[in-house]
Image (cartoon, grey):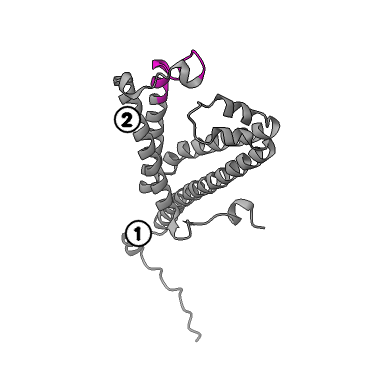
Amino acid sequence: MISPWDRWYTTSCCLCCHVRTGTIILGVWYMLINAVVLLILLSALNDPVQYHYHLTSAELGTDLDVMDDANMCIAAAISLLMILICGMATYGAYKQHAAWIIPFFCYQIFDFALNTLVAISVVVYPNTIQDYLQQLPGTFPYKEDLMSTNNMCLVFAVLLFIGCILAFKAYLIACVWNCYRYVSGRGTTEVLVYVTTNDTTVLLPSYEEVVAIPPKEPPPQYVSA
């Protein structure tokens, strides 16, 4: 009987790429995104007046700053950690080291779980969408139109959007998992071939030992009188 893991296992993704190639492309793409975010955060920390990351109370209707220096430092550290994790996945897929792919796979699972919790919260507390729209600044485009829309329609649209995101993230998780299985299976196959070859060499005698063995004497033949 074929297990569900083997049934969904494939070595191709996006209908044309190998899972290793797809994992490498995905890792590089995540690294570029986090590198851009890290550059923006470092630039904002270096010159906060230019980037205006301290929003005024008139923009959000609150007397609290959205991002202070501590939060900016935490966000920069998270971006740096993500660059490291994505780099490990890219290196592991390229050099075929399965253990290097595991941190990136765990991050994907964690991200998928967070998005699933967001979808569940929208279903359980549908009024949170209206509360979120009210917190948006007045200059946000189509804010009044969105607030005048029926709440059930907003919930359906948000759930449809989150569902598409979850489906795409699940497909990426499957690609990385198949890459991990391919790399780990390839390493296991190479080890088994080596062990079999080594055992065969040990069990078979060498050429010198075969030559040194004296030939057996033929049994005596009795001639009848």
Residue depicted at x 58% and y 36%: 145
Q: Nearer the viewer, residue 180 or 109?
A: 109
The image quadrant that residue 41 belongs to is top left
In the rendered view, tell whether residue 110 sits above or below residue 213.
above
Q: Nearer the viewer, residue 187 or 167?
A: 167
Look at the numbered disc 1 and give the secondary structure of its residue: loop
Quadrant occupied by the N terminus: bottom right
Residue depicted at x 55% and y 33%: 143
| Residue under pointer 1 | 206
Residue 86 placement (x, y as % from top left): 40, 38
Residue 182 placement (x, y as % from top left): 47, 52
Residue depicted at x 64% and y 53%: 3
Q: Nearer the viewer, mark 1 or mark 2?
A: 2
Badges 1 and 2: C-beta atoms under 8 Å apart? no
Q: Residues within 10 Å of mark 1 (few under 14, many from 20)?
A: few
Q: Residue furthest top?
A: 63
Type of the residue with mark 1: Ser
Q: Nearer the viewer, residue 197 or 60?
A: 60
Query: Magenta residues, as a range?
Result: 61-75
For residue 39, which numbered disc appears in the image? 2
